[in-house]
Amino acid sequence: MATNYDYEEAPATYDEAHRQDLGYDPNFVPDSVKSLVVHLYRHIREKNVYEIHQMYEISFQTLSDRLFKDTPWPSVDAVAHFVDNDQVFCLLYREMWFRHIYARLSPTLKQRIDSWDNYCSLFQVVLHSVVNMQLPNQWLWDMVDEFVYQFQSFCQYRAKMKNKTEQEIALLRQYDQAWNVYGVLNYLQAFVEKSNIIQILEQEKEGLEQFTATDGYDYSGGSNVLKVLGYFSMVGLLRVHCLLGDYQTGLKCLLPIDISQQGVYTSVIGSHITTIYHYGFANLMLRRYVDAIREFNKMLLYIYKTKQYHQKSPQYEQILKKNEQMYALLAICLSLCPQVKLVEETVNSQLREKYGEKMARMQRYDDEAFAIYDELFSYACPKFITPSAPSFEEPLVNYNQDAYRLQLKLFLYEVKQQQLLSGVRTFLKVYSTISLGKLANYMEVDDPTLRTILLTYKHKTHAVDSEGKVISNADVDFYIDDVRKTFSLCKYLCAAEKMCFKLPCVLYNFIAADTDGIHKQLWTNLRLAFQVTLLQDMIHVVESKPVKRYGDYFLRQIVKLEGVINDMDRIKLD
């Protein structure tokens, strides 16, 4: 067990004292680090995934907390001879070395560039060589996640040009291809294509593959590295495109993964949260509110039930942060599209506790409401980036907020377009049918303006899904029975017996009962009916009925009963 050689307490204490006396020395390798490196290398060669996971997830973090809180790990050159100068292991170690720098220190520009070079070397080996090893899904996900994070961090760093030194500007000029957006996208796309992961997932639907059933691991002695990196790269592509504001392309990259089902992406909590967060946000920006609400609800309910199991995880703070951001995004979705029936009672109670008051104010669509939309969006949105390099010939200015301001502007413009929809929705919920003229009087607008508002309501409550189909987000929908078209056809009928089949029953009273002068009487009555119906265009309301979830109610009561029984069992009776 990896935890059994938790790296001798006595030597670790000596290492710590020795480092405090001498300061950081990149060539000094404590005994505990040497032990970790040697055992990790051996387990990778033996494809012992369980031990690799324990050492990667627990032992590495333990040593980082104990010895390297504010200093880097020993350099790769210092540990290379312990692992026979193995190229792949040294690249993996260096990737972890840079990740530690980003997590606990502040990387320099040179370190950012060196990290890019290391990722290029590592990915080239995986893509163009035979890598015969198995790594935990957690480690492979962290590679993709960190790769995208460091790209995002570099773009933000480069966009703050105002206070750059001459040396930093010279380095940026010299290494202008470092963290280039095309390079990042090309590597992620190369993993998807070279791994054939899309074909593997298609074959799995036909029962020809067991990729999901085995969590991506190859139990026949092969390697899982390329396939799982290809799988997680689809999530990475979604995230990158969201950072760039290209939501349609991001969702298209995720299409091979069925997020309505369990998959390899759910085997790692960080991957699961990142996938749903960016999927939901992209759908929010594309006005597919129902899809966003449905996935946010499932993810928030999952975190609510399982977050206590991740309290000791180094990702726990990030889990809580994304949890709060998704609640804010769910509040936005429900304010723009009140589909509360899609939200579980547990999630809804948490949401009302956090944002109930703000959501009520957001329905007013005044300046205060727009300020709340601004606040929630700014808190919960991704850190958008401008991927282009600065112009060094022009005066140096900061442009790191430009992409965020553009996305915020587009979002608030969308919110303002929906300003009148809340009033329409209120009236539609009250009536099952209402004439166009009556609704126009209530809303204090003329008929043409009301038709424009109703058309806007139809437009804003419908969206186009990934398959090109029009989907509805409306909790209350309607259609207008434009009877004038029916009567214009009836007006040209000459036979009295045909008229009975064309006119609505409400107009039968206008038909003369006697046959004397029937044609004259008929046309007189038709003209009268035509004049009446011009004022009687009817709006018919279609309200979706929520599905009652009896199972959820009984499950909640069972859990409460079990809690009461457990409390009673703990009571000692005299």
Image (cartoon, grey):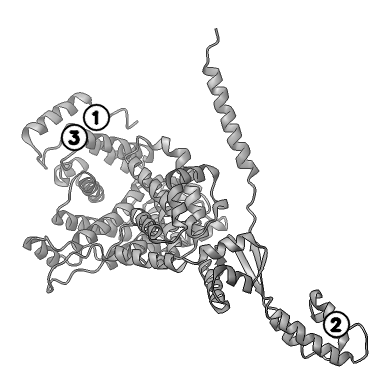
Q: Quadrant of the N terminus?
A: top left
**Which residue sits at x=37%, y=44%?**
319
Q: Which residue lies under the disc numbered 3?
A: 67
The numbered disc on residue 511 is: 2
Residue type for callout 3:
Leu
What is the C-alpha distance between the residues marked 1 and 2?
Answer: 99 Å
Q: Amino acid at mark 1?
A: Tyr
Q: Residue at x 13, y 63 (%)?
A: 162
Q: Secondary structure at mark 3?
A: helix
Task: Tell me the residue at 53%/52% (across/down).
Answer: 261
Q: Helix, strand or loop at disc 1?
A: loop
Identity of the amino acid at label 2?
Answer: Ile
The answer to whether mark 1 and mark 3 are in CB contact below 8 A is no
Instruction: Pick whichever of labels 2 and 3 is earlier in the sequence.
Output: 3
Q: Which mark is residue 448?
A: none
Residue 342, image x, y percentages: 56, 52
Q: In this view of the protein, which residue sits in the foreground, 456 or 282? A: 456
Residue 510, image quadrant:
bottom right
Which quarter of the rendering shows the C terminus?
Answer: top right
Q: Position of residue 390 (x, y in %)?
A: 18, 69
Task: Say which label, 1 or 2, has the lower sequence index.
Answer: 1
Q: Which element type, helix, strand or loop, lies under badge 2? A: loop
Disc 1 marks which residue?
7
- Residue 21 shown left or right of residue 516 in the figure: left
Say which of marks 1 and 3 sits in front.
Answer: 3
Marks 2/3: CA distance? 97 Å
